[in-house]
Structures are given as C-alpha cells and as structure tokens.
C-alpha cells in the first residue's frame, strides 16, 4: 500500500482523475507522500465492489486517498501534479475510460483544501492552460471505500502489463520529468 515514514503531522487528500491505478503510481513516487490507497468515493452505494463501480450505477468515482506530510509536500503541490497528470477538461472521461466513475474530482477534507482547490482551478482557468474549461468537481469527502487488494500498488506489481505500459508508464514518466525535485529517489529515476 505504498507506505513510508512521515517526519511529522500528516494530512489526507482524496482525488479522482480517471483510473486510480494511474494516480496511485504517480503519487507513490513523491517525497512526503506517506501512503497511497486506491478506492471509491462520491457515490451512494455502501461498500461498493470494483464491478459495481465500473457499471456506473453506484455514483462512486475511482479515487486515490493520499496520506502526506505537509512539511515535505504541500496540498497545493499535490493539486498541481493532479492537473498535470490527467485531463481535467473531459467530463466523465479519461482517454478510453468513459463514465462518471472516471470523473475528475477533488474531495476536500476541510475548508482550507476546498479554498485551495478552487483557487488553483481559477488560476489555471485565468492562465488558459487548456483550450476547454476545467470540469473538475470540488466537493466534500463523504465515505472513502478502500478498493480490493488486487488494485493496490497495481502498477508496481504489474509493470509489464499492456495497460500499465500504454497508459500508466507515460504518466509516471511525465511526473518524473516535470517534478524531479519532488521525487522520493530522484537519483534513481531517469529523466
């Protein structure tokens, strides 16, 4: 479940940007990230299964819950990375993954996270980083449901799987190139 020791007080962020395998693989690389878990949030069905969430009938999104040390990496840094490694302008879609379960969403844990998320979205819109408007939802976290064990650390356990090579690996490579200074083991990763 991608855990490391924290040097201080930890905070939690919950983000959805398409397939949770992609986000988990990227955030697990970051210095200051203590733990990353894939799961489901934002829907009504209690204790959903992957099959139920994939049907689109539960209202849940595939998300990652990130435990991080804010003395090492700020919530704003996590959001800037979030907006770099997925397309926040496609409604209910990331690449070939289509449905509300793949929506772009920030589930905030407190008022400060809500304000920061809205501020970063406003700034990105003002800078016209994308030609289309950002459709990322910002809402309070209800219940986070941890995904089944086989979804945890999926990329690190299945690096040669076709989806991992075609979809996840390029996102991780982009993260490594753009955020080299934020990586756990920057000296071991090629740029």
Image (cartoon, rainbow, N blue to C red):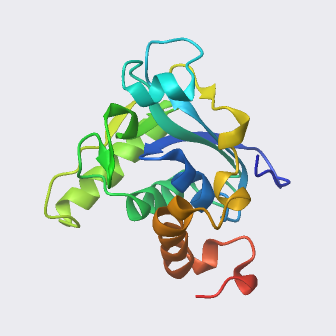
- Give coordinates of residue 47: x percent, y percent: 60, 15
Q: Is residue 179 left or right of residue 18?
A: right
- Give coordinates of residue 160: x percent, y percent: 64, 67
Residue at image coords 39%, 45%: 117
Query: Residue 2 or 56: which is nearer the viewer?
Result: 56
Q: Is residue 9 left or right of residue 112?
A: right
Corner quadrant of residue 27: bottom right
Looking at the image, how many numbered discs can be counted on the residues?
A: 0
Question: Quick check: 110 above or below 80?
Answer: above
Query: Residue 151 or 109: which is nearer the viewer?
Result: 151
Question: Quick check: 73 above or below 180?
Answer: above
> Is any atom of residue 165 visible in this view?
yes
- Give coordinates of residue 29: x percent, y percent: 67, 65
- Give coordinates of residue 121: x percent, y percent: 30, 51
Q: Is residue 106 left or right of residue 158?
A: left
Residue at image coords 67%, 32%: 148
Residue at image coords 66%, 51%: 154
Residue at image coords 48%, 22%: 52
> Is any atom of residue 112 visible in this view?
no
Q: Is residue 80 left or right of residue 11?
A: left
Q: Quadrant of the C terminus?
A: bottom right
């Amino acid at each position: 479940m991608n855990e490391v020791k924290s040097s201080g007080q930890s905070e939690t962020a919950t983000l959805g940007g398409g397939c949770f395998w992609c986000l988990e693989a990227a955030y697990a690389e970051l210095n200051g990230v203590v733990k990353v878990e894939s799961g489901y949030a934002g829907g009504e069905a209690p204790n959903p299964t992957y099959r139920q969430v994939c049907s689109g009938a539960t209202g849940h999104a595939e998300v990652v819950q990130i435990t991080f040390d804010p003395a090492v990496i700020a919530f704003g840094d996590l959001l800037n990375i979030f907006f770099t490694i997925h397309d926040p302008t496609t409604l209910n879609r990331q690449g070939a993954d289509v449905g509300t379960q793949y929506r772009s969403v920030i589930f905030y844990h407190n008022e400060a996270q809500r304000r920061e998320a809205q501020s970063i979205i406003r700034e990105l819109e003002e800078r016209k980083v994308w030609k289309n408007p950002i459709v990322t939802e910002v809402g309070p976290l209800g219940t986070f449901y941890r995904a089944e064990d086989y979804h945890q650390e999926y990329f690190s356990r299945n690096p040669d799987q076709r989806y991992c090579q075609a979809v996840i690996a390029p996102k991780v490579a982009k993260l490594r190139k753009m955020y080299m200074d934020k990586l756990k083991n920057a000296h071991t990763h090629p740029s």
